[in-house]
Amino acid sequence: MTQKSKNPLRRIYDWTLSLAEKKLAGLWLGLLSFAEASFFPIPPDVLLIPLCLGRLRKAFRFALICSVASVLGGLAGYAMGAFAWEGLSPWFFQYVPGFTEEKFARIQEWYAEWGWPLVFLAGFSPIPYKIFTIASGVLGMALLPFILASAVSRSARFFLVAALVAKFGEPMKEKIDKHFNLLALVFGLLLVGGFLALKFLR
């Protein structure tokens, strides 16, 4: 398959992966993590994983970059939703993969009942985090729970990925590529379910 025959999303994926070879890969990782939290379609794990291979100390530094930049990007997404959604929404619905009017309307309904657990789940799992950061701003979610849910979930995801890849190397990279999204979704659902159970049992 030639480069021209690939779909646009695949070309963006390949470009993101190529950033691991750049001299300023850490800076690119931060920029990617920030952008992915509000509009960029490729998750930062694509760049984080090759940067962490076999280097535990550097892996945690890269995970920290990912976590901080992603939370800041989430705040940018929150601000877009709170202050500019009316003007930006047509662009998001047309150009950002997975960002559809139907999905966004459904999320608005979920927020009325669930709130911050949705942000936590999206931050840890493969569910598009950007949809929830913007929705949080549109729907006026309290800022402190939003920041806490984002910080804990994003850090948990990125530090887990970094530790596994740095510790076990290429075999773990292949397993993460194949199974991590499903495992993260299941784990995130169980964790949120536990929080909710504690809440209702009080």
Image (cartoon, rainbow, N blue to C red):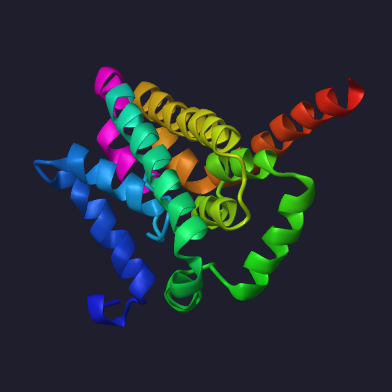
Residue 121, image x, y percentages: 63, 41
Name above or below for residue 46 compared with residue 56: below
Residue 123, image x, y percentages: 54, 41
93 sits left or right of 70 in the view: right
Residue 92 visible from this viewpoint: no
43 sits left or right of 58 in the view: right
User: Residue drawn at (40%, 50%), measured in percent from left and top?
Assistant: 76
Verify whether residue 55 appears in magenta.
Answer: yes
User: Residue drawn at (44%, 71%), measured in percent from left and top?
Assistant: 88
Q: Nearer the viewer, residue 107 or 153?
A: 107
User: Residue drawn at (52%, 50%), measured in percent from left and top?
Assistant: 133
Q: Nearer the viewer, residue 23 or 170?
A: 23
Verify whether residue 152 appears in magenta.
Answer: no
Residue 92, image x, y percentages: 46, 71
* Farthest residue, direction bottom: 5
Q: Nearer the viewer, residue 33 or 113?
A: 113
How many marks are shown on the rendered structure? Answer: 0
Q: Give the magenta part as a residue range.
A: 45-59
* Farthest residue, direction left: 23
Name above or below for residue 20 compared with residue 197: below
Residue 24, image x, y percentages: 12, 41
Q: Quadrant of the N terminus?
A: bottom left
140 sits left or right of 39 in the view: right
Q: Give the overall secondary structure of the magenta segment.
A: helix
Q: Quadrant of the C terminus?
A: top right
User: Residue drawn at (70%, 44%), measured in percent from left and top?
Assistant: 115
